[in-house]
Amino acid sequence: MKKEEKEIAVNKSSGAEKVEKIEKKTSAKGKTTRKTVAKTAKAPAPETAKGEAALGSAKKAEVSEKASRETKAAKARVDRALAKKKKAAEKKAAREKRRAEKKAKMEKHAAARKAIAEKRAAERKARVEKRKAEREERIRQRAHKKANRNQAASKRKAKRSKERKEGTNKGYGGWIAAVVSLGVVSLALATTVTVGAMDLKATKEGAMTGYKGTMYELTGIMENVDDDLDRARISDSPAQQSRILTDLLVQTRLAELDLEKLPISIEQNRNVTEFINRTAMECERMLAKLRNGEALSTSDHEILERLYKTNHAIKEEVNAFMEKMTDKDLKAYIKDGVGSVKDAMEKLDNLTLEENRSAHEKGEKDAHKTPSKKEEERIGIDPMKAIELCKDYFTAYNIGEYNCVGETVTREYSAYNIQGYDDAGTMLFAEVSQKDGMLLRFDYYEDCMQETFDRPNAEKIADEFLEKLGYEDLEVARAIDNGSTTDFTYVYEDDGILYYPDEIHVKVCRTRGTVSGFDATDYIQNHKDRVEMNPKISMQTAADQLHNGLTMEASTLCVVDTARGERLAYEFLCGYDNQTYFVYIDAENGGEIAIFNTKNLYR
């Protein structure tokens, strides 16, 4: 006999109910065959309708629930894809907005810088015109004196001619012959004396020009010393202190050289020279402390404060004197040691006398102590290698010869000091890392007197220089025009965030189109792989913390270095009372971190 079994299966994959009738047949031999026939479900028999209806309802509910879950999952996937696309679009829009804001900010800065540059150009033009007028006046006076001399010579010649004529009429032939012979001798002697006088005059004028040039150079150096002392007295970073003191030491040595070139006796400039020498000595002492990992003490800062006040007074006195000094004043001083130059030297002597006396009373000369710790800087290259690297860094500068003139050692880095001169005698001073040969900083002391290159070209020159050194992902955050030079501040940029601790300063001379200054010490010390930083408050929330009177013009997200370490902040460029400010708001708690007036960036 054959045994038949029937099963009911429901296919739910398509969402429509499909009934399949499965028949199982068992043969007499015990074999079972399976046959599946797709049929349309028929109405159940009356006796089983109630049970099968309940079963069908359960199956339908299960199918409906599963279809609903699949629909929700598909919708969720679509929503996620749309959200991701929207986020990417928002990110792109935010990036474009930042670029637009940055462009607007730079244009505003450019306008401000242009106004300042025009003002400085006008002041420079006024000084040039003043010097030109003085030079023309001197030429006019010389021409007037020469005309008077010629007139007097003509009168003398006419008188002698008259006397000779009268002598001939009287028959004094022997006397005439004697006068003629004497005249020939006198003429030869006068010619010799005149040529010698002309040579002596040219020598004196050359010396005068040299003295004036040295005095102008000394004025510029004292400006640099004043700036270094001003920053050193308020700096609390050992790395920054080391950089400032190193530059200050160089400037004081240059000042000493200029003082030796001036026609001033040892007695007259003894106190000034002692003050400059003591400033250099204090720089060396403090640098030695920093090399040994020690911090500058309160007394060190007091010394820097006093040195700054004295030097500032010297600078003001020198500037005021140089504006009024004439060639006549300088000649009077050189010839007889009198006049306004003497008065100015006496004032400088008195200013430095008080400071030197105070230093002696406090016994600061005994403050130079032998370092208590050994220097443990790892040196990877020797001075000769540093010189070879400089030849590659400065191939376009035509430096004849390089020399290693010392070292700079701080807790953060150690460097060789490399110095060289170009064909025109312009000095280049560079610091090269002893560890890996990286160029840390350099100054090229060339004269920049006019604007041959415009701002965009100057920025291109700076970009190419950084590219040659291997720096990438940098963006200009600040640009300051100082007459014929422009100082660019580059910072590391990643995903729209500016990292101000990783900054590089590049100064471009717009006269010759060369980089004349560079400082990458902050970038080399601070650049690293950082943990991703995300703001906890929105930019709008941060903007709400600004003073009500401020008008926001641009904004961006940045990382700033504070006493608490690196902090994520919103940078806002704002206007208030015809002034422009940078305001930094903490992106974590909305607190105000710092405020800068842009006028301080364009001095």
Image (cartoon, grey):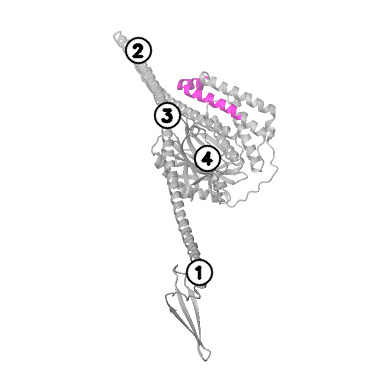
Q: Earlier in the sequence, mark 2 or mark 3?
A: 3
Query: Which residue is depicted at the point 52% across and 72% down?
Result: 51
The disc, 3 or 4, on the residue closer to the chain's N-terminal end is: 3
| Circle 3 residue | 119
Q: Are marks 2 and 3 in contact (CB under 8 Å)?
A: no
Residue type beneath disc 4 = Ala
Residue sitting at x 58%, y 49%: 434
Q: CA distance from mark 2 to mark 3?
A: 73 Å
According to the picture, the residue beneath numbered tag 1 turns out to be: 59
In this picture, residue 396 sits left or right of residue 165: right
Q: Which residues are magenta?
A: 307-336
Residue 349 belongs to magenta span: no
Compare residues 191 and 426 and report the one nearer the observer: 426
Of labels 2 and 4, earlier in sequence is 2
Structural distance between the alpha carbons of marks 1 and 2? 158 Å
> How many numbered badges does the structure rendering display?
4
**Magenta span includes 310:** yes
Indicate the secondary structure of the residue bearing disc 3: helix
- Name the kind of residue labelled 2 in the image: Trp
Q: Earlier in the sequence, mark 3 or mark 1?
A: 1
**Labels 4, 1: front one:** 1
Q: Closer to the camera: disc 1 or disc 2? A: 1
Residue under label 4: 542
Q: Which residue is mark 2?
A: 175
Secondary element under disc 4, as helix, strand or loop, is helix
**Residue at the farthest left position:** 169
Front disc: 2 or 4: 4
Q: Residues within 10 Å of mark 2 (few under 14, many from 20)?
A: few
